[in-house]
Image (cartoon, helix red, strand yellow):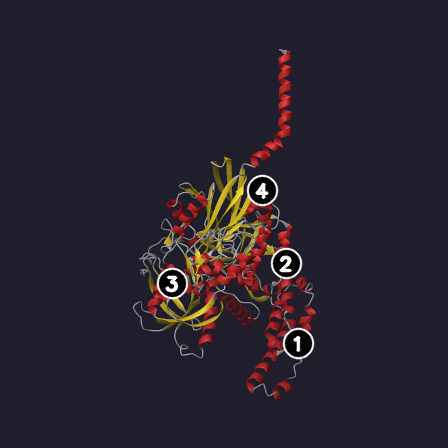
């Protein structure tokens, strides 16, 4: 018995030793039976890593590169809309994004609709620059495949063999591209049937021996009109193992019939991971998951070579992008909150601001034309408002993040009936959320952000039909509105097809709205990003160095029919760089009016009770930390996080930035920037002022300005009496202002209120 026991122990030890020796080889063998596909879509040029509170919130290509390098038998695929949507993509027409995708070792990319925003020739240049196949099997130019001679491979499909498995890839681009970029960018371009092309590609790849077939599609699972979706393709076409999808900005992974469909959302907030395991080419299993930025940030470190390359490329135009162009006292709201792009559901102050800028540009454009006295309205589709602008100093990059697309101002002359139909389409997807609680759903990129008019609508009425282009009757009133006089000028009639109105909108919007699609474009103005930049600059100068906008101007009003619009409690999770602020007294300012002190609870939640139904803005301050919050229970944004920050370094840097913009040869044209610099400097506290290292330039510039020889100006022929008087007033104003600042100090005391 003892002998058998000893033999058993010996056998066990021998087996353990063998396992120990051969375990690495067993694991390698296991990895050799596994292929991993990482995939991205709709990055829109957002390819740098961004961290907030120490947590990764945007997955940069430096992280993606690390993921791929650390994973054996891995591929990296993009499902389109990679190149357009950020300043880096805009300034390089996509080429710098391709350089970074090359460095990250992408294996394939399909063309998205926004790849065409720079024009078809720019698309080809980017495809030629790619070290990987750029594919789209259904895009043709003059009866030939669009990418035929512009990229690695044949421009529509390819087969990659890994560990004995032949994987066939083909690309499909949505026909909706014709509606999402201006026609000039698609001259001679044809988008063939997504469905028929898919059938052909599946048959071709099968005939070439592919064991696994993957459609890389920029098609999406939602569609307007008769454009097919990726879900429908999966239902109709057999033989597709995987669809790596994009376009609808959906975060989802699912299986329809035998096809796995995966899409990661938008703006690099997630990445997809598809795992393919096999014993042999005929026995393959597929699993998929969507990984968040927070998950990825815990497990992977950035590849420093990619980070360095991004910084080098960005530095080529960082000086222009980082230039301070204005200052706002409150947040200009746009972009997404709790995953909801609010400008696609409701009026926002940033949408209002953009449209006001369009109105000013339009009036200037038409002042010497036969249309100068016509009623004028501006319309910006909410989907084009891509980001917010935080309270504080505004830089050019902030404007480009809001309006990253190369859209220009377009001028049309239309009749009121066409405007009604346009607005009906813009609000047609809105729905009431379940329950009689007044909440709205139905995000739509065509939601109206407006100026020069007021709109009222009833969501209970018949909505616009996107399939038949039937108008609907939700819009109950449209009035021309004078913003300066703050009064209604004229109510428009839905039946009026003869009166003339000037419509200002971006050139993309025209092709989203059938009622104005075929109307002649009378004039084209500048790019919207430049128009907004100039308007912000003007508002800042006019308002002594900073301006303030209400959260909205009530330009788009919904009629409420016996709905129970209860007051609600807003909840804010308050943090700083060290973590959650528990049981701390926070100073708040509600809607720019009401001051109070409210304590966070033991979980760091600051609760504000009895808020009126709808939207509110809240400024929070704790010691030297501050931040702004947007709440809106109508859109289900009533429980949000915020990280309070210390703005000292931010203030010092931006004031120094403004001073550096003062030209050394001071002229009368320098007055506004000089005054902006002085106002901004004087708003600093004493500690901040002591750290502005170029303050001496501001002092010298003011001295030079005050030493302008008035007598010379009077005698110079190029100045008339009006100019002389204006200059004299400006000089006197500056002198009085400097004296005033030296003598007086303004003190603002916060009133503490316990209840609202």
Label 2 SS: helix
What residue did someone put label 1 on? Answer: 665
Q: How crowded is mark 4: few (under 14 residues within 10 Å), some or many (20 or more)?
A: some
- Which one is in front in this view, the residue at disc 2 or the one at disc 3? 2
Give the spatial CA distance, label 2 vs label 3: 41 Å
Q: How crowded is mark 2: few (under 14 residues within 10 Å), some or many (20 or more)?
A: few
Q: Earlier in the sequence, mark 2 or mark 3?
A: 2
Give the spatial CA distance, label 1 vs label 4: 58 Å
Q: Is residue 580 visible?
A: no
Residue 649 numbered tag: none
Q: Which of marks 2 and 1 is nearer the N terminus?
A: 2
Give the spatial CA distance, label 2 vs label 4: 27 Å
Residues at marks 2 and 4 touching, judged by CB atoms closer than 8 Å: no
Q: Can residue 693 be seen in this view?
A: yes
Residue 71 numbered tag: 4
Q: Is 21 positioned to the left or the right of 204 in the image? A: right
Give the spatial CA distance, label 2 vs label 1: 31 Å
What residue did someone put label 3 on? Answer: 513
Residue 370 picture location, percent across and down: 40, 79
Q: Quadrant of residue 12?
A: top right
- Which one is in front in this view, the residue at disc 1 or the one at disc 4? 4
Residue 159 picture location, percent across and down: 50, 46
Residues at marks 2 and 1 touching, judged by CB atoms closer than 8 Å: no
């Amino acid at each position: 018995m003892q002998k058998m026991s000893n033999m058993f122990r010996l056998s066990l030890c021998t087996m353990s030793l063998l396992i120990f020796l051969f375990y690495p080889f067993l694991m390698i063998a296991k990895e050799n039976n596994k292929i991993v596909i990482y995939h991205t879509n709709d990055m829109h040029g957002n390819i740098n890593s961004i961290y907030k509170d120490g947590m990764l919130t945007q997955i940069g290509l430096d992280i993606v590169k690390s993921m791929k390098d650390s994973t054996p038998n891995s591929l990296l695929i993009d499902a389109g809309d990679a190149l357009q949507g950020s300043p880096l993509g805009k300034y390089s027409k996509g080429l710098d994004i391709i350089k970074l995708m090359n460095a990250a070792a992408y294996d394939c990319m399909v063309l998205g609709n926004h790849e065409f925003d720079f024009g078809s020739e720019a698309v080809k240049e980017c495809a030629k620059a790619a070290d990987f196949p750029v594919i789209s099997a259904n895009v043709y130019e003059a009866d030939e495949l669009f990418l035929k001679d512009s990229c690695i491979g044949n421009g529509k499909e390819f087969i990659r063999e890994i560990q004995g498995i032949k994987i066939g890839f083909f690309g499909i681009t949505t026909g909706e591209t014709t509606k999402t970029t201006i026609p000039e960018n698609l001259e001679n371009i044809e988008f063939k049937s997504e469905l028929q092309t898919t059938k052909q590609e599946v048959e071709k790849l099968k005939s070439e021996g592919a064991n696994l077939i993957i459609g890389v599609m920029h098609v999406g699972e939602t569609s307007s009109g008769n454009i097919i979706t990726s879900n429908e393709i999966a239902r109709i076409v057999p033989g597709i193992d995987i669809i790596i999808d994009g376009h609808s900005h959906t975060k989802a992974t699912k299986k329809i019939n035998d096809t796995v469909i995966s899409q990661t959302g938008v703006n690099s907030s997630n990445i997809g991971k598809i795992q393919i395991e096999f014993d042999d080419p005929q026995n393959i299993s597929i699993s998929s998951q969507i990984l968040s930025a927070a998950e990825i940030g815990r497990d992977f470190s950035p590849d420093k070579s990619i980070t360095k390359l991004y910084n080098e490329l960005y530095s080529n135009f960082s000086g222009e992008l980082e230039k301070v162009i204005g200052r706002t006292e409150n947040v200009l709201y746009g972009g997404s909150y709790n995953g909801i792009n609010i400008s696609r559901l409701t009026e926002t102050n940033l949408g209002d601001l953009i449209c006001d800028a369009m109105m000013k540009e339009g009036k200037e454009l038409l002042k010497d034309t036969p249309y100068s006295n016509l009623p004028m309205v501006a319309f910006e589709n909410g989907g084009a408002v891509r980001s917010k602008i935080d309270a504080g100093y505004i830089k050019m990059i902030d404007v480009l993040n809001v309006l990253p697309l190369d859209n220009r101002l377009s001028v049309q002359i239309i009749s009121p009936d066409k405007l009604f139909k346009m607005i009906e389409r813009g609000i047609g997807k809105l729905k009431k959320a379940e329950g009689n609680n007044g909440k709205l759903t139905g995000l739509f990129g065509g939601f109206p952000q407006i100026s020069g008019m007021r709109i009222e609508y009833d969501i209970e009425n018949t909505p616009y039909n996107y399939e038949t282009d039937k108008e609907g009757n939700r819009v109950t009133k449209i009035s021309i509105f004078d913003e300066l006089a703050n009064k209604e000028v004229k109510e428009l009639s839905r039946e009026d097809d003869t009166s003339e109105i000037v419509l200002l909108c971006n050139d993309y919007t025209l092709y989203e709205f059938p009622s104005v699609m075929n109307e002649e474009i009378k004039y084209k103005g500048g790019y919207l990003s430049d128009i907004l930049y100039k308007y912000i600059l003007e508002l800042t100068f006019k308002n002594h160095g900073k301006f303030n906008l209400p959260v909205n101007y009530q330009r788009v009003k919904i009629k409420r029919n016996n709905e129970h619009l209860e007051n609600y409690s807003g909840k804010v999770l308050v943090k700083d760089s060290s973590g959650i602020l528990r049981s701390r007294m926070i100073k708040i300012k509600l809607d720019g009016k009401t001051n109070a002190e409210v304590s966070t609870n033991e979980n760091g939640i600051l609760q504000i009770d009895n808020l009126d139904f709808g939207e509110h803005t809240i400024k929070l301050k704790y010691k030297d930390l501050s931040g702004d919050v947007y709440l809106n229970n109508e859109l289900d944004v009533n429980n949000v996080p915020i990280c309070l920050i210390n703005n000292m370094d931010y203030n010092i840097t931006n004031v120094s930035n403004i001073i550096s913009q003062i030209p050394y040869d001071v002229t009368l044209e320098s007055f506004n920037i000089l005054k902006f610099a002085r106002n901004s400097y004087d708003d600093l506290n004493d500690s901040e002022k002591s750290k502005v290292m170029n303050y001496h330039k501001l002092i010298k510039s003011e001295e030079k300005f005050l030493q302008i020889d008035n007598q010379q100006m009077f005698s110079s022929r190029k100045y008339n009496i009006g100019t002389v008087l204006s200059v004299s007033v400006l000089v006197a104003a500056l002198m009085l202002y400097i004296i005033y600042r030296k003598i007086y100090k303004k003190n603002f005391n916060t009133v503490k209120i316990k209840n609202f």
